[in-house]
Image: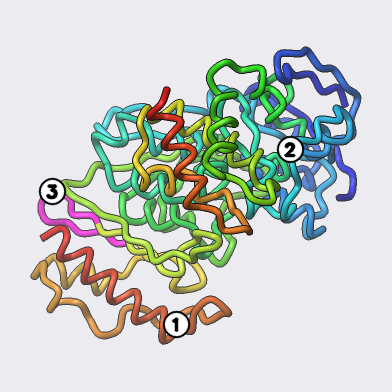
Amino acid sequence: MKFKAEINGQHVELDISANTLLVDLIRDNLHLTGTHVGCDSSQCGACTILVEDQSIKSCNVLAMQVSGKKIKTIEYVETDAKYSKLQTSFNQHHGLQCGFCTPGMIMGSIELLEKFNYPDENTIREQLDGNICRCTGYQNIVKSIKKFSEEL
Amino acid sequence: MRNFNITKPDSINQAFEISKSDDSNQYLAGGQTLIPTLKFDLNDSNNFIDLSSVKELNGVCEDSNNGIVIGAMTSHAHVAASSLVLDRIPSLADLASNIGDRMVRNMGTIGGSLANNDPSADYPASILALDSKIKTNLREITSTEFITGMYETCLDPNELIQSVSFQIPEKSIYLKFKNPASRYAIVGFYLSVFKNNKILTGLTGASSYAQRCLPLEKALENNFDISSVPDKILDDYLSDLHASSEYREHILKTLIKRAILKLS
């Protein structure tokens, strides 16, 4: 089937089978391997990306469901003047240990920060409850996001 | 995942025509339950009718009876943030804001949730307690007719939910004791008080499908107090790896009392 979308600002057209998961299209067809597959069962949030600026789990969406939409993956973030600083904040405040969940954490945080200018700790924890960190580095993840919003 | 076909109609009529052409065709809403089901190879449909491009199924508006109408493809996140829902039925916005997690709420839809009728889903409790009508492309269905069993509704194979209407209560609340991993209701309880002291309830998670508790409604209409809660709420309680039937009964009674106190 014909899949068309704007991914990280680039127009993409691909021939795919209908059963292609969005995360597989991103990783295998487009080689954008920053988006991770954690649980492959829509539990962990490692595969979180933005579709029309809303966070979704790309392992739980068929690519054809979002054909025609604007998609952003973690690879776009370093080119973004505002949110590349969020990556720096994760770095500075030890917001990652093994780093596997980090792309999903960052993408989920972007939607959160677009909705709340200065989110408090509870809001951050509530809004990111679909992103799981197995290193249990939640304290510093929350701190990274909070410091970023305060220093903005 | 085995292969299949996807069609993307842009109108209700077109979707219905495709559905009628083969009874094994199946509607696809947000897919947040359907896609895991496909991964486990528990669905044998060969063609999915993706409704995401049918614009007339999306959005929240008022109806002529001063109620709220929510399009079937409206996401949980949209319902949770809708100023109309927040203003008229805050308990419904609250319910939507506690379904799954952020990413699930961005994809999952009210129509998909109701058609799936999971025994632990939240929306089935709301349609019972808010006197909903489910409008399909063929007819209008009352909420008590709509729910027929575990994962079962009275929808015909090709029938498509278009929208769901909700009546506006004077006050209402939805309380959920959720599974911390799935956020599904182990037990959920919806309580609404309408004009003229009419009470409606919606219980989910506790038994094999969402239902009202008529003796409780009657008792609360006579005396809106925790002392009115009958000893027997349901005939049967679900028992599974998440909670025993005794535990569910205990939690349900606790939620009922909390809801009464909150609305008193």
Tell me: A44 left or right of A27.
Answer: left
**What span is in magenta?**
B192-201
Is B249 placed above or below B157 here?
below
Q: Which chain's residue wears label 1?
A: B
Which of the two residues, B17 or B205, is positioned nearer the viewer here?
B205
Give the mark count. 3
Question: How many neighbours does mark 1 have within 10 angstroms: few (below 14), some (14-19), or many (20 or more)?
Answer: few
Callout 3: helix, strand or loop? helix
Question: How many neighbours does mark 3 have within 10 angstroms: few (below 14), some (14-19), or many (20 or more)?
Answer: few
Question: How many neighbours does mark 2 have within 10 angstroms: few (below 14), some (14-19), or many (20 or more)?
Answer: many
Query: Which quadrant is home to the C terminus of chain B?
Result: bottom left
Q: Position of residue B116 (x, y in %)?
A: 59, 54
**Residue for badge 2:** A35
Q: Position of residue B20 (x, y in %)?
A: 74, 38
**Residue for badge 1:** B236
Question: Do dots 1 and 3 share one subunit?
Answer: yes
Q: Which chain's residue wears label 2?
A: A
Tell me: A127 left or right of B231.
Answer: right
- Which-is-in-front pick, marks 1 and 2? 2
Q: Earlier in the sequence, mark 1 or mark 3?
A: 3
Tell me: B164 left or right of B56.
Answer: left
Estimate the spatial distance between the alpha carbons at disc 3 and disc 2, rounded to whole Å: 52 Å
> Which amino acid lies under the numbered mark 2 shown in the image of this protein?
Thr
Picture residue at 73% right of the left edge, 35% below the top:
B49
Estimate the spatial distance between the alpha carbons at disc 1 and disc 2, rounded to whole Å: 45 Å
Picture residue at 71% right of the left edge, 55% below the top:
A41
Which of the two residues, B4 or A78, is positioned nearer the viewer here?
A78
In the rendered image, is residue B180 in sight? yes
> Which amino acid lies under the numbered mark 1 shown in the image of this protein?
Asp
**Residue for badge 3:** B195
